[in-house]
Amino acid sequence: MATFPIFDACALFGPWPQHAADLSVESLVQVMAQNNIARSLATATSGIFHFYSQGNDETLAAARQYQQLIPVATLDPRAYPDCLAEAERRAGEGFRLFRFFPDRQCWPIRFAPFRELLQKCDALGVPVAVTVTRAGDITELADAVTFTQSPLLIAGARPEMLGEVLAVARGDAKFHFETTHLSAPLALETFRDTVPNGIERLIFASYSPLRYLSSALAPILASTLSDEHKALVLGGNLKRLLSK
């Protein structure tokens, strides 16, 4: 277990289809306390699977109740143009990040409402995180955001996508990557050694309590990264990303 406080880029609470685990906000806060998680960027799952505005209301209420939670809004470009007003409203309420789940909501990355919504987020100065699931998704996203140099966090990249991760990261410094699934041996070291300032662009995200926190932490703690670099991945990089 890490001996320094951890900042988690993604935690979830609420219902999750076909999953029996306790995903209550109380369970999330308990997991944080047990594992030295100082702050978590939290999202209500109802905003992913049901109505994004309702989920964002629940996220805001949870963050007001538990100061260790930082509110993250979900936005759904299928709800165009209302999603543009939702982005502006949530930015005004202090949401620190906007998350997109095209895989769960079944819309393509090459999607005009999504492109306009990304431009809106950029104008508001709120960084975004986008889940990818297929080879080519990160490349397609890179082509869609050439208009900005604002930080963009890629979620869901798996070991078999490492080549694409490295190529896109080397070509565009705004891309940051969650470590959640980059668990193949030496994946983190390869990113560090291949990408300019690579260690500063890796962000820890656990998706707890949906996923076991230990499975997200283990690849980082077991890696050959220095303690200084582990501290950056497990919190320092995220704090810097949110301060931009």
Image (spheres, helix red, strand yellow):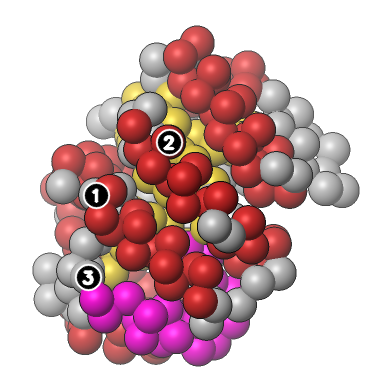
Q: Residue at x 84, y 38 (%)?
A: 20
Q: Which residue is mark 2?
A: 90
Q: Earlier in the sequence, mark 3 or mark 2?
A: 2
Name the amino acid type tagged 2: Arg
- The answer to whether residue 161 is left or right of residue 243 is right
Name the amino acid type tagged 3: Thr
Stretch of the chain drawn in magenta = 130-147
Residues 155 and 82: in front is 82
Q: Position of residue 194 (x, y in %)?
A: 20, 82
Helix, strand or loop status at disc 3 = loop
Q: Which residue is mark 1?
A: 125
Q: Position of residue 172 (x, y in %)?
A: 21, 79
Instruction: Tell me: residue 36, above or below residue 147.
Output: above
Name the amino acid type tagged 1: Gly
Residues 85 and 218: in front is 85
Q: CA distance from mark 1 to mark 3?
A: 11 Å
Q: CA distance from mark 2 to mark 1?
A: 12 Å
Q: Residue at x 16, y 47 (%)?
A: 244
Q: Quadrant of residue 198?
A: bottom left
Pick the quarter of the image with the N terminus. top left
Q: Which residue is mark 3?
A: 148
Q: Is residue 64 visible?
A: yes
Helix, strand or loop status at disc 2 = helix
Helix, strand or loop status at disc 1 = loop
- Asked if the residue under mark 1 is in contact with the one under mark 2, i.e. CB atoms within 8 Å, the reply is no
Q: Is residue 8 visible?
A: no
Q: Earlier in the sequence, mark 1 or mark 3?
A: 1
Q: Position of residue 168 (x, y in %)?
A: 31, 84
